[in-house]
Image (cartoon, rainbow, N blue to C red):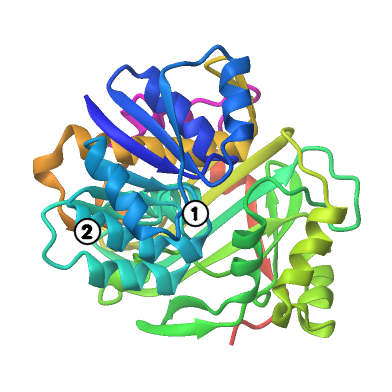
């Protein structure tokens, strides 16, 4: 059995730990600076199969000592993006595999450098976006002789919005602010370009409902670098209910809270509620040449909340933990195939969908999934602003 150390017992760390432990193939340790809450939750669930450790992610020596003492095989970071590179360094020094959920571009660049020459796998960007969205996009691109345009859109939205932002906090507030405020990257005319966050606003109609989408940072992961020589245009945008982008621009740009993210985080967490009643929207469109003709293929899916192992999870928890656990499982069950820096797009979509953890992307218990065959009939995209 592989021994895993998951750092962070929050919205994604705990559900992922429970799923991996319940598989029977992993001995799971959870490390957190505050163990009281996680201890109470596991006790309430009568769970004694997960080891709990009081660990500070900033204390590299303590982490390395714990990894060595407990013969840990892989470190999984479910902590904010700024912890990723230091934890990857601890994993490299300890000779173990490393996985994380980071959406931060600079963090993944640092991890790429740390992983050079490693005989263990270093896999950042696990989860949904970045993560599964790159896997789905890469799978579609394989069906073309030449790829012209790749569009990726993802949204995690409350099913019943009732505030001015039309939004609920369903995942890390630090990660949310990071993707709203940091530079975005894409491909334009075959060249890597920097795009402004919260720009490139467009409207989307999906399954009869209207949304907006706009540039956000990190969703592409490493996909741009992997396909820079093969694709003319590639971009990623986040989907929200109409009007959300304009209000976030007011907060981050006009009121300059992008320069004071501590205050912005306090405002959002004080005013915007959390919810387990949400939906995750996943959309990928690839246009290119097939048998000499211009052709488009799409992947569209919705993920809803569900109960897994007796625990009620939100849609974003289901989708993100499915992306993380499936990749961890694929790598550790096939260790000889993976070493050094491993991109999400290197994992075949069919392998993830057939995986015991990744199958949640295929199943949609509350409503039928939207098949690729019908996606073109219910999707339209109308640019509202220039993305120049």
| Location of the C terminus (image quadrant) | bottom right
Identity of the residue drawn at 65% across and 56% down: 380
Residue corresponding to mark 1: 129
Q: Magenta segment, which residues?
A: 351-369
How packed mark 1 is, by other alpha carbons closer than 10 Å (few <14, some 14-19, many 20 or more), is many
Graded by Cα atoms within 10 Å as few (under 14), some (14 to 19) or many (20 or more), the crowding at tag 2 reads many
Residue 178 vs residue 205, the one in the foreground: 178
Give the Cα distance between marks 2 and 1: 25 Å
User: Residue 80, how many percent across, how many down?
Assistant: 53, 58
Does the magenta portion include 347? Answer: no
Apparent side of residue 258 relative to residue 293 in the rendered image (left or right): right
For mark 2, give the secondary structure: helix
Q: Residue at x 26, y 35 (%)?
A: 70
Q: Mark 1 or mark 2, which is nearer the start of the sequence?
A: 2
Q: Are marks 2 and 1 in contact (CB under 8 Å)?
A: no
Left or right: residue 280 versus residue 169 is left
- The answer to whether residue 332 is above or below residue 192 is above
Q: Residue at x 49, y 62 (%)?
A: 81
* Of the pair 52 and 346, the residue shown nearer to us: 52
- Label 1 sits on a secondary structure element that is helix
- Can see residue 72? no
Residue 137 vs 353, above or below: the answer is below
- Which quadrant of the structure image shows residue 4? top left
Q: Which residue is mark 2?
A: 92
Camera-side mark, 2 or 1:
2
């Amino acid at each position: 059995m592989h021994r895993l150390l998951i750092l962070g017992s929050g919205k994604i760390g705990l559900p992922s730990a429970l799923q991996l432990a319940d598989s029977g193939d992993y001995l799971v340790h959870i490390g957190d600076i505050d163990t009281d809450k996680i201890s109470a939750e596991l006790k309430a669930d009568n769970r004694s199969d997960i080891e709990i450790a009081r660990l500070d992610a900033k204390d590299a020596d303590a982490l390395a000592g714990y990894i060595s003492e407990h013969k840990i095989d892989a470190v999984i970071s479910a902590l904010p993006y700024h912890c990723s590179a230091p934890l990857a360094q601890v994993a490299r020094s300890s000779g173990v595999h490393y996985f994380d959920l980071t959406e931060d571009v600079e963090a993944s660049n640092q991890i790429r450098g740390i992983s050079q020459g490693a005989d263990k796998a270093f896999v950042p960007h696990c989860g949904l976006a970045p993560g599964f969205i790159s896997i789905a996009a890469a799978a579609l691109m394989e069906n073309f002789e030449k790829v012209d345009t790749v569009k990726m859109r993802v949204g995690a939205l409350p099913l019943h919005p009732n505030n001015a932002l039309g939004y609920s906090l369903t995942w890390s507030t630090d990660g949310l602010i990071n993707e709203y405020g940091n530079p975005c990257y894409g491909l334009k005319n075959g060249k890597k370009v920097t795009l402004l966050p919260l720009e490139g606003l467009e409207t989307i109609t999906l399954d009869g409902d209207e949304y907006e989408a706009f540039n956000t940072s990190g969703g592409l992961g490493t996909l741009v670098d992997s396909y820079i020589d093969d694709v003319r245009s590639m971009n990623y945008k986040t989907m929200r209910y109409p009007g959300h982008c304009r209000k976030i621009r007011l907060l981050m740009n006009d009121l300059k809270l992008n320069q004071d993210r501590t205050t912005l985080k306090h405002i959002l967490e004080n005013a915007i509620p959390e919810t387990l009643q949400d939906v995750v929207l996943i959309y990928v469109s690839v246009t290119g040449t097939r048998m000499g003709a211009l052709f488009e293929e799409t992947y569209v899916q919705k993920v809803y909340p569900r109960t897994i192992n007796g625990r009620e999870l939100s849609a974003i928890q289901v989708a993100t933990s499915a992306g993380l656990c499936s990749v961890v499982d694929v790598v550790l069950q096939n260790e000889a195939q993976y070493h050094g820096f491993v991109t999400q797009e290197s994992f075949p979509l069919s392998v993830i969908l057939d995986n015991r953890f990744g199958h949640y992307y295929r199943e949609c218990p509350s409503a039928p999934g939207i098949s690729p065959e019908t996606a073109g009939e219910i999707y339209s995209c109308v640019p509202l602003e220039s993305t120049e």
